[in-house]
Amino acid sequence: MTAHIISGTQLSQQIRADVTQRAAALSAQGKQPGLAVILVGENPASQVYVRNKVKACEDCGFYSVLEKYEAELSEAALLAHIDRLNQDPKINGILVQLPLPAHIDANKVIEAIAADKDVDGFHISNAGLLMTGQPLFRPCTPYGVMKMLESINYPVRGANAVVVGASNIVGKPQAMLLLQAGATVTICNSKTRDLGYHTRNADILVVATGKRNIVTADMVKPGAVVLDVGMNRDDEGKLCGDVDFANVKEVAGYITPVPGGVGPMTITMLLVNTIEAAERT
Ligand code: NAP
């Protein structure tokens, strides 16, 4: 059996077409949706990510602002910039690209973003709203994974879902979203004793560790849906995920590729969160 490939690129195109229409409708009422992206320092991967996010905004007809600061920017100065954007009526969403330089407390920065402009969904009050089943903003990557499951009409309710990785930005909110959709959820982390024991029981397997080939074909239940969040480089420097794609696709029922899978969906869901914020104003 060869798995059906869930293309994040194709699904993104459909969702972005809808976002573009909604943005045009808002702009016609003088309420063009606006996203501000803040980048501190010269991290090369972050520079690519913010460029892609700003371009995606422009392609959908958003107003977008990219504020770039040197790595030496003080925490106080960054908080002041966030405060200014919190007050700016043209801005519906604020995103601070992580990681931040070591002298800046990322938690403090995230908490400084107005919760109703926190389009990344990382603010503690948004994490709490998600946890209690009343989400305002869902973190973009796990939200994108849920959209991918929806796109194949997967019956999440009652399914065994295993999330490998327990970070605040991917693994934990992913587990919450799956739980709220009715799945029975297991979360694995680096201390998990026998990862394969858990993954082999998964109807839905989400992998978000940053460890290349952590999931191999013998760890996957035949017919399972495998959603690969990881972004790594292989020996030739090419982008790859956490899953041994070539072999796992022979066992799984559905699988997401890297690149072209969860990655494009993450940016798409940022656009969705921003348009929803603009529509709420
Ligand atoms: P992170 O903060 O480093 O968290 C990694 C998680 O994986 C941790 O919970 C860690 O466990 C767990 N882990 C590490 N080794 C493990 C192992 N051997 N077995 C089981 N669990 C293990 O990373 P992240 O921010 O969640 O990102 C994870 C990956 O997704 C990275 O490759 C990142 O680049 C990628 N990513 C992609 C997108 C996208 O748009 N496609 C978005 C965000 C992230 P502990 O909690 O025990 O440390």
Image: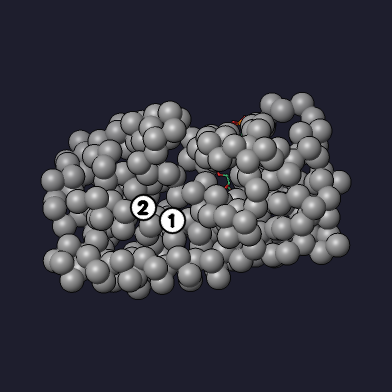
Asked if residue 246 shows in the view, the reply is: no
CB within 8 Å, label 1 to label 2: yes
Q: Position of residue 207 (x, y in %)?
A: 65, 45
Q: Secondary structure at mark 1?
A: helix
Residue 98: x, y in percent? 41, 46
- Of 131 and 227, nearer the camera is 131
Q: Secondary structure at mark 2?
A: helix
Name the residue: 86% across, 62% down.
1
Residue 104 x/y as whole percent: 32, 36
Quarter of the figure with residue 135: top left
Q: Position of residue 108 (x, y in %)?
A: 30, 31
Identify which amino acid the numbered label 1 is placed on.
Met
Q: Is residue 31 visible?
A: yes
Crowding at dot 1, Cα within 10 Å, few <14 / some 14-19 / many 20+, comes out as: many
Q: Is residue 260 above or below residue 141?
A: below
Q: Which mark is residue 273?
A: 2
79 over 17 or under it: above or below: above
Which colour scheme appears in the figure?
A: one colour
Mark 1 sits near ligand 1, with its Cβ under 8 Å away: no
Q: Amino acid at mark 2?
A: Asn
Residue under the point 63% across and 59% down: 152
